[in-house]
Image (cartoon, rainbow, N blue to C red):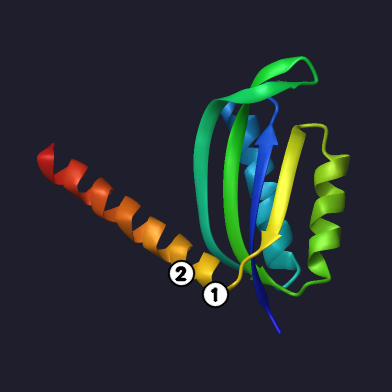
Amino acid sequence: MLNQYETVFIATPVLSESQMKEAVAKYLDLIKENEGELVYEEDWGLRKLAYPIQKKTTGFYHLIEFKSEPAFIEKLETQYKRDERIIRFQTVSMDRHAIAYAEHRRAKRASATQQTNVEE
């Protein structure tokens, strides 16, 4: 049975844009290789951290929503720990209320994007 998860990771701010895309692609591929199903992904960009991590005050945030077997989460988090580009991560299992909220948030974001495109 596939459960739905949401993972957010923070990559070090010293990465170039291509290095950041490469890091994201690595984790998307890892999910797909392990029979996971990608639901949604969102790049939050460079943001200020609440407190310094490894003497860094900013980081690149990225969110990935996916479905997979529960056993895969340990493998994913092991990869995060081994990757020197990732300074923090969190993966949570989503219940039906969290899934509904995420779908509502995506729809709201999509309609805001459409309105912006129409105004231009």
Residue 10 placement (x, y as % from top left):
67, 35
Q: Around disc 1, counting alpha carbons within 10 Å, would you say few (fewer than 14), some (14 to 19), or many (20 or more)? A: few
Please report the residue visible at 62 percent of the width from the left and 67 percent of the height from the top: 94
Q: Is residue 15 above or below residue 10?
A: above
State the image coordinates of residue 34 (x, y, percent, origin top left). 76, 69
Q: Is residue 69 left or right of residue 48?
A: right
Pointers 2 and 1 in contact (C-beta within 8 Å): yes
Residue furthest to the bottom: 1
Q: Secondary structure at mark 2?
A: helix
Would you name the residue on which mark 2 appears?
A: 100
Quarter of the image with the C terminus in it: top left
Residue at image mark 1: 96
Instruction: Give the camera-side residue of 21 and 5.
Output: 5
Amino acid type at mark 2: Ala
Instruction: Compare residues 35 and 51 and report the one nearer the observer.
Output: 51
Q: Amino acid at mark 1?
A: Arg
Counting the numbered discs, the total is 2
Please identify the quarter of the rendering in which residue 72 is found: bottom right
In the displayed structure, 18 sits above or below 99; it is above
